[in-house]
Amino acid sequence: MEVKRTQIISLPLDNDSDVGVCRRKAVGLAKEIGFNEVKTGEIAIIATELVTNVMKHGGRKGKIIICQIEDELEQKGIEIWCCDGGDGISNFKDALKDGNSSLNSLGIGLGSIRRFSDVLDINPNPTPILEELYFNKAKSFKNCIRCRKWTPQVQWLGKHKKLEIGAASRCKPGEQVNGDAFVVSHINSHTTVAAVIDGLGHGKEAHWASHLAKEQIIQKAELPPVALMNHIHQSIKGTRGGVIGLIHIDTNKQKLSFTGIGNIECFIFKGKEKKTMLSFGGIMGHNMRTPRVFEFSFLPGDSVCMYSDGITTRWKIENLDWKQSAQHNAEIILNQFSRNNDDATILIIRYSV
């Protein structure tokens, strides 16, 4: 997705005082564009950590470009490029983990940048105009990080009254925490995003991966499905990773969109007809394929069901009375068809008649 760039600020980096200068420039632009106080604070952290990284690890010489961006839907945001001539990051995946540092520091900088950015790219190719005007085709910088953060939409605090939600989840027997997670986020009175997430394996590391992904979905639910999946993928790098099935429901359009990476099962039940949804292989946070979105009609009386591989595939839709509540059926499936050697989660959403 190409964007339009305006209000471009380009600054050299060669002194510790540049940290404060760049932070103030980024914060000033964020306030002008319309970021709220919380998100402006996150932009301040991004700018601070990027420039600090140049001073600590990038040979104390670099360049930062801060600009306003706008996509084809006229959503505005901030883009920051930060480049240096240091030795680079030998293992970017490990560097994203909190506590990992080649110096005597806390090692939370790149992790913070990842969490607070909507998009994080390493050594992307600048557009010809950017390269001509701001990189001078000199290729003097070996390493470059690009971050994007979009202005947040107003959060909906109500409920989606046309949808009935049922969910049940439990950790692997013997474990203390659940490596699975589910989330339902109502964007407005007619639009809802929901997901089932399975952190790779089980235990604390799986729990961390799945709940970090859940947190990102809650924070960025308004993003289009592909952009949201890409954001989750970037955000959980450095964790064990996981698989996700994600749906976007619009009851005004009576449409459901699905995208999935990994083995989360998902289908729509339409009274007598069952439509299974296609998910692509891969592990979010590691080797995700380009997500694809599949669209289906979603009408009053229809139900959508998603579940992790801790639920066996032996159960049949005929085993359930679909006139019962979604919560009742979710609990029956979890109790009767979950495996003893894995976490298990099921989510059922019914479009009420």
Image: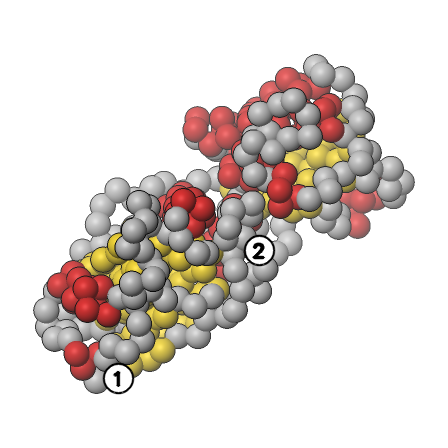
Residue that lies at the very extreme toward the bottom in this rendered image: 272
- Where does label 2 land, which residue? 286
Residue 257 visible, this angle: no
Q: Disc 2 or 1, which lies upstream in sequence?
A: 1
Residue that lies at the very extreme toward the right in this rendered image: 138
Q: Nearer the viewer, residue 346 or 177?
A: 177
- Where does label 1 land, which residue? 273
Indicate which label's residue lies in the foreground, 2 or 1: 2
Q: Secondary structure at mark 1?
A: strand
Which residue is rendered at x = 29% and y = 51% of the image?
A: 174
The crowding category of the residue bearing disc 1, from other C-alpha atoms within 10 Å (few below 14, some 14 to 19, many at least 20), is few
In the image: residue 78, left or right of residue 272: right
Which residue is rendered at x = 89% and y = 40% of the image?
A: 138
Q: Is residue 306 above or below residue 123?
A: below
Which residue is rendered at x = 81% and y = 40% of the image?
A: 142
Residue 3 visible, this angle: yes
In the image: residue 288, left or right of residue 347: right
The crowding category of the residue bearing disc 2, from other C-alpha atoms within 10 Å (few below 14, some 14 to 19, many at least 20), is some
What amino acid is labelled 1 in the image?
Glu
